[in-house]
Amino acid sequence: MSLITHPSLGFAVGDPERIPLTKETLPSTEEVQGAAHSLILSASGWRKIFADLSADGPYASWDPGHSLENSLARGLCPADTIIVAGMALVFSSFIKERCVEKTERGRRPVMLLGIDTRPTGPAIADVFVRVLMGEGCEVRYLFIVPAPEIMAYSAQTTDLPSEHEFHSDGFAYISASHNPPGHNGLKFGIAGGVLTGAQIAPLIAAFRAFIAAPSAPELALAAIEKADAHDLAACYEKVAHWKRYSQSAYMLFAHRIFTDEPTLDTQEKMLSEIAAACAERPLGVIAELNGSARTQSIDIDWLSALGVQTKVLNTDPGVFAHRIVPENESLYDCCEALNEVHAENASFALGFVPDCDGDRGNLVYYSKTLRRAVPLEAQQVFALVCLSELAYLRRRGEARQIAVVVNDATSMRIEAIAGAFGARVFRAETGEANVVSCAEKLRAEGWIVRILGEGSNGGNITHPSKVRDPLSTLGSMIRLLRLGNATQGMTCFNLWLDAVGASERYRQDYDLDDVIASLPVWATTSAFEPYAALKIASDDKIALKDAYRRLFLEAWPQMLPELAARFGIASWKAFASIGPNEYEIGDDFGASKNGGLRIVFYDLRGESCAFLWMRASGTEPVFRIGVDIRGGTGADEAWLRRWHTDLVNKAALLVSHS
């Protein structure tokens, strides 16, 4: 046996006989603890820079300064190998506890494992596979796969027998999402979604205990050495086999999400209706994949089956044409490509750029008004998707109570859109798992929750999915632009205009410019701008919020006249978002703990008209802030944000001096 390569990609999958750690290379406990110090552990993912400090490898092309976080080195240092083994041990214990009855019957827990296209992915996966197999798990390794695909695969019914190709008991996904390529990490999940905050907390505690143990290096080495080389070879040789099942599961799941129909026959009817509409009124989409995991997925086949014309760019996995995070200048290539293609074929109207794990896909569109392609803001995309999905529910005659679930930093524009359709908005703390948990709780209470997500971060989650997915976002946009008879006005757009009493604005050749112009006007801080992520020295976020409270209460009487004159603000209430819940907290800002704090402003009629928001990031060492203003301009947002930022910085200074 020797190095096994992927049959179609030619990439190294793993060498069963090359154990990645030996007694001679075993690091000290202190070295392991030092390497683990920078780890960020949350339900959204466990992340750090995994690029080997000692590696003299290449760097990302956009980083002439050779920052370690942009390293393209493929190997792990010994201390990081121990860390990965500890993560695998903790997760295997969690899964085995959930599968006690199965193991008692002689069945092994079945684990799905996948990676995005970061250079350290295969090395981390090699450690993970060894530990999981050594701990008695069956591993179905998919190699490069986008996050929504592995989650769609894991969403298949778990009551199938273990040997069934669509059965799994859990998944581990190796990725650092939108972070630079030198970063990497893990997401853990079951039944189609990542573990909730409550589920992940014991794993975090167990992992920290492992790292703190003096015997951690020896325990990790023993776990790595347990796997049988022949079993490892069989696992690595079947990556293409399991990837085929993964793609099949994803295609079926994507059709179910797009159509909201339970059977293949009813799904086909809806898919055919969209395909016919796209044949009558052609629509084209640019897919600028930036070497991401989506280069190895169903995107083009899925879009083509809907009758959508496509053009795909930057399809070599792991070859990043620009920064991984699909924001700002990272969207310029897609805009340029859309401009060029639109000049030749005017049906091309949309483009998307995913992050590395492919669960987020930010959009650009061709504006006929501006005569060029421009990016859509994250909050704008989410508003359009909500409009589309709520109009779709109305078109289908949904009569039950409808809810939309969003994160705490989503613009209150969503309340205006939902209200027009008689739906109610519920808020949760930022973090995909929190939003999903809130939606599941509401469904158990009888609510219809088709659309949910984090408006501040871009993309959306469409039931029954539990993860953001560019295909869900594109599906909503395609439905908004093409579903129904445009000549007779039977479209999602005219249903929206009817709901807001603006039916006269409908025209049968409407495009995205028309829909955007009809949205309620709100000015909101972009989460992707540097000024929205403050570098705060204090780790005590509760003390910071208490200090902010003192400053805010002192400033309120002096600021009220100007706030009233500028924005019609007359009063305020504070809300804490912790996990899947948001609730009022009076003036005890510290009660929001490490969750989100939202101070909502109201006008004289008692209607919400603005908010201030803050929260410590769960995946990056920053303190995120934002503001939201009804009817506001960019200048209004900047003015209110500067006041908010000044209070946060002064509060941080007070805490550091106390």
Image (tube, rainbow, N blue to C red):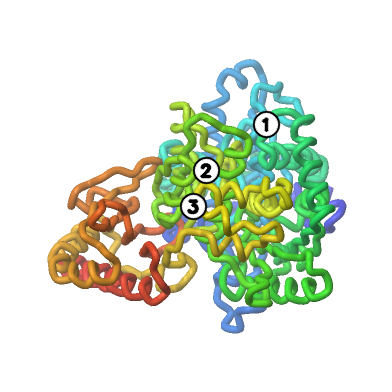
Dot in front, 1 or 3: 3
Q: Which residue is mark 1?
A: 156
Seen at 68% across and 73% down, the residue is 335
Q: Which residue is mark 3?
A: 454
Q: Secondary structure at mark 2?
A: helix
Which secondary structure lies at badge 3? loop
Residue position marked by numbered label 2 in the rendering: 219
The local crowd at label 3, few if under 14, some if 14 to 19, many if 20 or more residues have their Cα within 10 Å, is many
Q: Amino acid at mark 2?
A: Leu
User: Which of 623 and 499 lies nearest the eye of the viewer?
Assistant: 499
Residue 383 x, y percent position in the rendering = 52, 55
Find the distance from the CA under tag 1 to the CA under tag 3. 25 Å
Q: Residue at x 40, y 45 (%)?
A: 428
Q: Amino acid at mark 3?
A: Glu
On screen, residue 401 versus residue 495, left or right, reads left
- Residue 19 seen from this side: no
| 388 or 308: nearer the viewer | 388
Q: Quadrant of the C terminus?
A: bottom left
Q: Which x, y percent locates residue 217?
A: 51, 49
In primary-sequence order, the first of circles 1 and 3 is 1
User: In the rendering, which numbered label is found on residue 637?
Assistant: none
Q: Is residue 453 visible?
A: yes
Label 1 Cα crowd, 10 Å radius (few <14 / some 14-19 / many 20+): some
Q: Nearer the viewer, mark 2 or mark 1?
A: 1
Residue at image location 29% in from the left, 43% down from the top? 583
Q: Left or right: 376 with respect to 202?
A: right
Q: Is residue 300 left or right of residue 75?
A: right
Instruction: Please tell me which residue is depicted at 78% across the width and 39% down the height of the picture.
Output: 248
Q: Secondary structure at mark 1?
A: loop
Q: Is residue 126 left or right of residue 308?
A: left
Q: Amino acid at mark 1?
A: Gln
